[in-house]
Every structure is written in C-alpha cells, then in structure tokens.
Image (cartoon, rainbow, N blue to C red):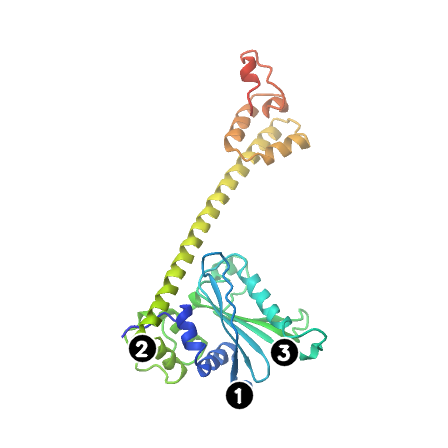
C-alpha cells in the first residue's frame, strides 16, 4: 500500500474539496472550534489559482468555503516560502472580505473571513525568535487585530491561521487534533499501511482517500503532473535564492571596500567632500575601489586618489594620466 502526499495540490483537493465532512473536521481542529462553535456544514465557493511566479505553480488557493453563519474560510497549502507570501495572504483575506458587498449594499452584510495557510516551511523560525528575544511562535498560530493596552480582541472580521509543518514534534501525536493533521501532511508518503491505532474518523478517511491504489490512471497522471510542477517551482526558487545570495555577497564586498577607503582617508586626515563621498559610496566596481584604496595610502589630494583630475606624477605619460578610473 502506498499513499500520496497530502501536500500535493491534487491530493489536497481530492480529500478536502470533495468531502465537506473532512474539511469541517480540519477547520474545527485548526480553529479550536468545539461545542456550539463547531462547524457542522459548509458550502464550497469557487477557488482562485494565483501563481506567484510566471510558469511555476508556487501557490494555490486550494479550498474556499462558507459556513452557516456566513464566515468565509480560505484554506491553502503553501510549499515554498517566496517573497511577499504573508503580504499575499493578507491581501487575499482582505479581498475576500471586501468583495462580499455589491455597490450600495450596507456594511452590516459583511461577514468574517478566516485565512488558513498550511506551510511546508517555518515562517517564524525558533532560532530567529530566540536571537531577537521574542516569544516562540507555536506550530499552530492564530492571528487577529488586538488592542494593545487592554488586549481586547474586538476586531475579528479578518483572521489568520498558520500551520508550520517543520515545527511538528518527531513522534505521531496520540490524540486527535491539529498536530495529527500536521503529522499526516508531513508523513503520509512514508507509510506502508494505515496505522492500526490511528483514530477512526476524519484522519483515517483522509488517508484512505490518499491511497494511490484507489486512484484512476487519469488521477495518477494529475498527481504526477503536480509533482513535476512542484519540482520546477522548487528548482526556480533555489536558482533565485542562489542569485540573491551571490548578489548580496557582491554588494557586501563592494560596501566593505568603500568603507575601508573612507576609513583610510579619515585616518590620514584628508577632507572628503560630499561629491567625493558620493562617488566612493556609489561605485559598484570592486577593482576601481581597490585602485582608489591603493592610491589613498600615499597620494595626498583627494582628487588624485579618485582620479577626479589628472595625476601630476612626472612618471606618468599623458596617456596614462588620463586613463579612466
């Protein structure tokens, strides 16, 4: 027995966009809904496909639904941490809130929106939080606008929920809830069979729907197609990350050379005009900065160091003295 990856968009939709009972169970666990607040029925809404990068399926609004009270839920699986991700989550949630009204309709018709993002990466890494002396953000975090002094949670119209899968504890949770869903999202493809002690109900049903033996050939093809798209997106993200790292390293080198040059000039007591400083800080060529730094050790006029005027050394020929910096 082999199980498909629940994080795969096709599989996610196969489970949660066709079985409202399973989607209700997921929402209740992620939102902590119990008792009278339990979501018992939902109405599916059209989903939007919004790739962040042309040619790469980096993100999908997988499932949209509304409960009997009118609250809209936007549930998505996000595999790659791309720039602007949180901004996009906020944008889509606010858009879902705003588009409820037609022109001239009353604002009281607006109902709450909850954006739920299941992330295959850490949004708020523990190490970074510790380094900044900030409280750790749990694997399942819920966000809304709160009045700072009183802690009043009065503005609940737009809320956000993030499930960061890498923060999942190592062992399978023994009790039902959000952590068990996270474990299934993270480990379903590693299973050879449904664990005998796995709670009956939505968790077992989700795994049964992820059993690849139940897929038709067309469904298997769709599943593999999404795998290819995810791999392409990951490769593209790696290339962009590498380019960004290289660019950042280059900028750091250039900045360091410019700072070293200005430090030498200051140590020698040479006055640096605003124009000269702008020329140094605006230079993006490491070789030019090295040449200026070499001159700064022994040359006196700042104009000669930066080649703002021809050097007066008799050892230079007219051609060499007029060479570009």
Left or right: 269, with 116 as reference point: right
Q: Name the residue under label 2.
A: 214
Quadrant position of the C terminus in the picture: top right
Would residue 99 be visible to someone looking at this image? yes
User: If you read the primary sequence from the N terminus, does the residue marked by circle 3 or circle 1 appear first?
Assistant: 1
Is residue 204 shown above or below 254? below
Of badges 2 and 3, the one in the foreground is 2
Would residue 180 be visible to someone looking at this image? no
Is residue 133 shown above or below 110? above
Q: Residue 4 appears in which quarter of the rendering?
A: bottom left
Q: Name the residue under label 1.
A: 35
Q: Nearer the viewer, residue 36 or 228?
A: 228
State if disc 3 and disc 2 touch (CB < 8 Å): no
Of badges 3 and 1, the one in the foreground is 3
Q: Residue at x 41, y 77 (%)?
A: 15
Q: Could you tell me which secondary element the residue under label 2 belongs to?
A: helix
Q: Which of 120 and 148 is in front in this view?
A: 120
C-alpha distance separating marks 1 and 2: 35 Å
Is residue 97 shown above or below 227? below
Q: Mark 3 points at which residue?
A: 111
Point out residue 25 in the picture as x, y percentages from the top left corner: 46, 81
Of badges 1 and 2, the one in the foreground is 2
Left or right: 180, with 325 as reference point: left
Q: Residue 16 — which label?
A: none
Is residue 2 shown above or below 86? below
Quadrant position of the N terminus in the picture: bottom left
């Amino acid at each position: 027995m082999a199980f498909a990856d629940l994080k795969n968009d096709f599989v996610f939709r196969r489970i949660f966009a066709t079985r409202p009972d399973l989607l209700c169970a997921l929402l209740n666990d992620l939102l902590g809904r119990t008792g009278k607040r339990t979501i018992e029925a939902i109405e599916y809404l059209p989903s939007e496909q919004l790739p962040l990068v042309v040619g790469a399926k980096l993100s999908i609004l997988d499932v949209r639904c509304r409960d009997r009270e009118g609250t809209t839920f936007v549930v998505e699986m996000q595999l790659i941490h791309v720039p602007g991700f949180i901004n996009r989550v906020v944008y889509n949630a606010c858009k879902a809130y705003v588009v409820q009204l037609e022109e001239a309709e009353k604002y009281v018709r607006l109902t709450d929106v909850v954006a739920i993002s299941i992330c295959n990466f850490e949004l708020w890494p523990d190490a970074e939080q510790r380094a900044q002396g900030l409280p750790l953000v749990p694997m399942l975090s819920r966000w809304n606008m709160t009045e700072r002094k009183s802690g009043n949670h009065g503005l609940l119209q737009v809320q956000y929920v993030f499930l960061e899968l890498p923060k999942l504890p190592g062992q399978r949770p023994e009790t039902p809830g959000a952590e068990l869903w996270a474990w299934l999202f993270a480990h379903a493809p590693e299973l050879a069979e449904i664990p005998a002690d796995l709670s009956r109900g939505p968790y077992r049903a989700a795994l049964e729907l992820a059993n690849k033996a139940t897929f038709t050939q067309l469904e298997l093809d769709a599943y593999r197609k999404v795998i290819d798209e995810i791999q392409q997106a990951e490769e593209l993200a790696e290339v962009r990350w590498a380019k960004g790292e290289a660019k950042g390293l280059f900028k750091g080198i250039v900045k360091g050379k410019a700072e070293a040059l200005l430090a030498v000039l200051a140590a020698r007591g040479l006055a640096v005009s605003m124009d000269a400083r702008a020329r140094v800080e605006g230079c993006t060529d490491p070789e030019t900065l090295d040449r200026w730094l070499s001159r700064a050790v022994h040359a006196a006029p700042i104009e000669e160091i930066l080649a703002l005027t021809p050097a007066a050394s008799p050892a230079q020929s007219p051609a060499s003295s007029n060479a570009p910096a």
